[in-house]
Amino acid sequence: MTSDAPVIAARNVWKLFGADPKKYLRKMPSGHSYDAIQADGYIAGVKDVSIDVARGEMLVIMGLSGSGKSTLVRCFSRLHDITGGTIEVDGQDIGKLRERDLIDLRRNKMGMVFQSFGLLPHRTVLENVAFPLEMRGQDKHTRRERALEVVRLVGLEGREDYFPRELSGGQQQRVGIARSLAIEPDIWFLDEPFSALDPLIRREMQDEFLRLQAMLGKSIVFITHDFDEALRLADRIAIMKDGAVEQCDTPDRIVLNPATEYVRKFTEDIDKARVVRAGGLIRDGLAGDGTPVEATATVRDMARMLVSDTRETIPVTRDGAMIGALSRNDALSILVGTD
Amino acid sequence: MADATMAPAPASGSGEVSPQRFALILVGIGAALTVFQYLGLLPAALHRLPESMIPPFAPMLDVAFNFVKDDLGLLTFTRWLTGGLEAVLDATANLLFGKRRWPNIGPIPWTAIAGVATVIGYYLGGWRMALLAAFTFTWTALVGQWKIAMETMSVLVVAAPLAFIIGLSLGILAWKSRAFNAAIKPVLSVLQTLPFFTYLLPAVIFFKVGPTAGAVATTIYAIPPMILMTTLGLQKVSPEVVEAGKMSGCTKFQLLRNVYLPAARTEILVGVNQVIMLCLAMVVLTAFIGMPGLGAKLLAMMGSFKLGRSFEIGVTIVLLAVTLDRMSKAWVVMQPRHFERGTPWWKRHIILLTAIGVFVFFCIVAQFIDVANTIGRRQSLSMGKEIDTAIKAFLSIDVVKATTGFLRAFLNVQVLIPFRNFMLSIPTPALILFVTAFALSLAGKRQAVYAALFFSLVALSGWWDRSVITLYSVISAVALAMLIGLPLGIIAARSEKWSHRVLLACDTAQTFPSFVYLIPAIMLFGITDIAVIFSILIFAMVPLTRYTIEGLRAVPAEMTEAADMAGASRWQKLVNVQLPLALPTMAVGFNQAIMFAFFMVIIAAFIGTQDLGQELQRTLAGTDLGKNFVLGICVSLMALTFDLTILKWSSDRKRKLGLGD
Ligand SMILES: Nc1ncnc2c1ncn2[C@@H]1O[C@H](COP(=O)(O)OP(=O)(O)OP(=O)(O)O)[C@@H](O)[C@H]1O
Ligand SMILES: [Mg+2]
């Protein structure tokens, strides 16, 4: 397997909820809309989704409540058996895995943080965190050491022997995060992992995740309602509506070229100057001279220069090499929000 | 009954007869039949099913049983099975009251057991529970009932865990397998209405007389609620917790063991509480198959009209019941608590160490001080004779005597006997029609079909007259219970404080083994028909009062406020707003009262009545398994008819009122 093959490859994935979804899907005419499906008594949790997650990538999924984000991620980890399509993880069709292999996959490769934490109520913080290790059959001492380590990492030392109900929502969420960290999974599913955290800890956690990802090259699927968070973390953002992925692209392209009206509405209120980077503004046929800007700089970063500079076009470099030029007017109109 | 408050019949299509109309027609036919009977115009075959038409169910069942028992070798199998059980029972008997069996080290001194019970009480519920436990066990020892109480306990400590394990396993199975669940559901609902006598005789036949049969009957009796609670608890486990388990790489077994069962802890412990209470109730009743213990002693004492001793035994049973109930309920709500880091080992296990310490201490003390070991007949503080004299003196006070005498005479002559004769005079088909109409108008077609079917089966069983007498006892007792219980509930529901108090009293009363209710009845009315009705009455009053209060208290505040604003008087508010809304809940209480009454009527047969209970008790003396079953099923069928009808009505009504369920 080459390293540029996707870690997760989903093809035409369907997940319907209802009486006999498999049979219904087989008979359903193609191009049936979400509402038409609903009228037939089924709910399209995931509707014909094809998406790849590259190795080492952080894919952020966004969308309104009930748009199927959690359901899609549950399909990736096969907590749901999908109704149609295929999902391959590391080139293996997980729909065809036997019980034993599925357990192995989850024990060794996958980790998940749940939206409402999913802590075992009868176990202490430490026992909750050590639970996946225990299931793997690690000996008591090793797993205790490891659990203590991650509990410290999420800032819960001193609370090791508390029970979940003795913790605040944010603390419980951190237990959930610690539990998924304990086994150092290659593929990580995070369902609104920071929703209950205060801004400070949230920031810390985000940094921690970025650090881990850069260091260990994890592939992460991350669900959030918070655009700022998405922008901070995402390599790509997928926007879902009624079970379908409307657009999946890099943040600046989503903002600059929304694929559908819905995506445009969805991204309307974002401060584009903080999303769009110089690299994304390069236009063919332009050339400029003078001091170049770095391709990764956001429009906001270049604000002072854009306003004071008088050049029409500004060259853009990446890692020291010239890759093109952008029009100062384009950048300015993004900065003042009239595009 | 509740007909008066029935919802108006839904406007049905022009050609169709509404259920209400149809029910009315059925009643009309029934009434006509009855009138014909009075006029002497009804052929005898329509009044009662002729003997010749009654299929020989009992002999047929006997043949079937004998075939299974002897030819299929079930008897050898069960007797072989009980070998192990018997050994365990012998061991607990040795430990608790010194039966001469392996391991031959008992009996454990009473002080040691009481001490350990106190420590457990403290662990589960603090000082109050510790005091309760200490008091119960000390009382039992001091009034000289330690040995019989331990005879009862020695069966209980085997039957309850057994019922727990079996119930838990079956519950898990029912949760796992849809097919098994579907198969077991109806069996459970029949089992729960089956009179306990029907459990006893098969137990005796298949498992020998004595503690073994008692333990088996007790175990089986306590299994159904454990199954239901287990299934319920497992179904309620939050899906995300389960998913977290799956993502942690649990195998199926690990998931069950580490995720499902601990997460369903509360429901499972509620099941444990019910198992313990049902075991206690049943183990007392095993007196009827000659098992020694508190029940047997009570039976003997009541039989010889020794009221003082009966009273003392009754108190012991009640104390034991309350202690066991409170302790197991405290266990349900107890949550694990963490220790600070670095707490030394002994501090973490202080309760366990104390319990062991107390146990050893008293065992040693008992070696030197006799009363700490056993309290003999002469040292006991039993006041049986004195209480006896006091009660009898009280009863012979003129006023009391006149009152009970009047009640007895009035109720008997003016109310009960006429009612009974009336019930018996109704032709069989007419009564079946009445019951069917009742089910039809309250619950609908399906229930009506069941009612007709069930009562026809009762008629076919050949025990119609006795069944009708049973029904008569139940109906009169429940009616009387309503006369007292409903007003009591309505008055109590007016204030927070009194609701709370009366509910607590009801809760406590519901934990008493049914047997105990016979004591005050016999005290007041001697061994008579009225005593039977009276004991059923108090037993059935408990759920009636309880659900009346709960129903009234649950009426949403906006609605009573709206009535207040409309200027309704207290009485108008009660009649127009509160009662209609509380009625579905009250119906559940009414249903329970009927179930309790069916249960009690059979126990009360011991006092001497002419209903099915009497016949059932007679079967226990012999080996009339077939007859025992037929009788048991008769009771069960009648009870089920009411159960199905009333509960259906209640849930329909709740839905209609938007009270949700
Ligand atoms: N087990 C289930 N059975 C039936 N319907 C379900 C189930 N799980 C999810 N759904 C439905 O699928 C749709 C998508 O749900 P999902 O939980 O994926 O939403 P979401 O995007 O994660 O929303 P949120 O942001 O609120 O978490 C919803 O309409 C939901 O009602
Ligand atoms: Mg979600």
Image: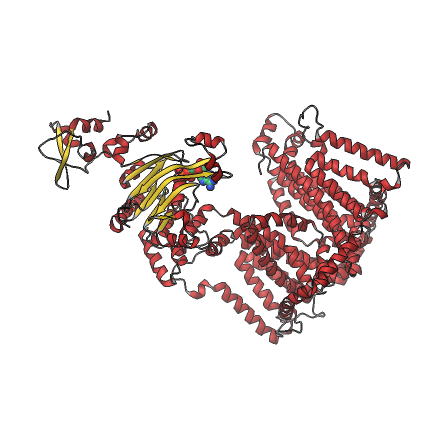
Q: Residue furthest left?
A: A290
Asked whether A160 or A312 is in front, the reply is: A312
* Side of B652 relative to A208 (left or right): right
For residue A221, above or below residue A242? below
Q: Quadrant of the C terminus of chain A?
A: top left
Asked whether, in this view, residue A86 is left or right of residue A311, the answer is: right
Name the residue: 14% across, 29% down. Answer: A285
- Compared to residue B135, the image places residue A113 above or below, namely above
Quarter of the figure with residue B39? top right
In the rendered view, how is the structure colored?
Answer: secondary structure
Q: How far from the left and from the top, in percent, is residue B380?
A: 70, 67
User: Does residue B312 appear in this view?
Assistant: no
Q: Position of residue B101 (x, y in %)?
A: 65, 73
Task: Using residue A51 as the reference point, say whether residue B305 is left or right of it.
Answer: right
Considering depth in this image, is B216 or A171 the residue closer to the camera? Answer: B216
**Looking at the image, is B570 positioned above or below residue B73?**
above
Res B515 quadrant in image? bottom right
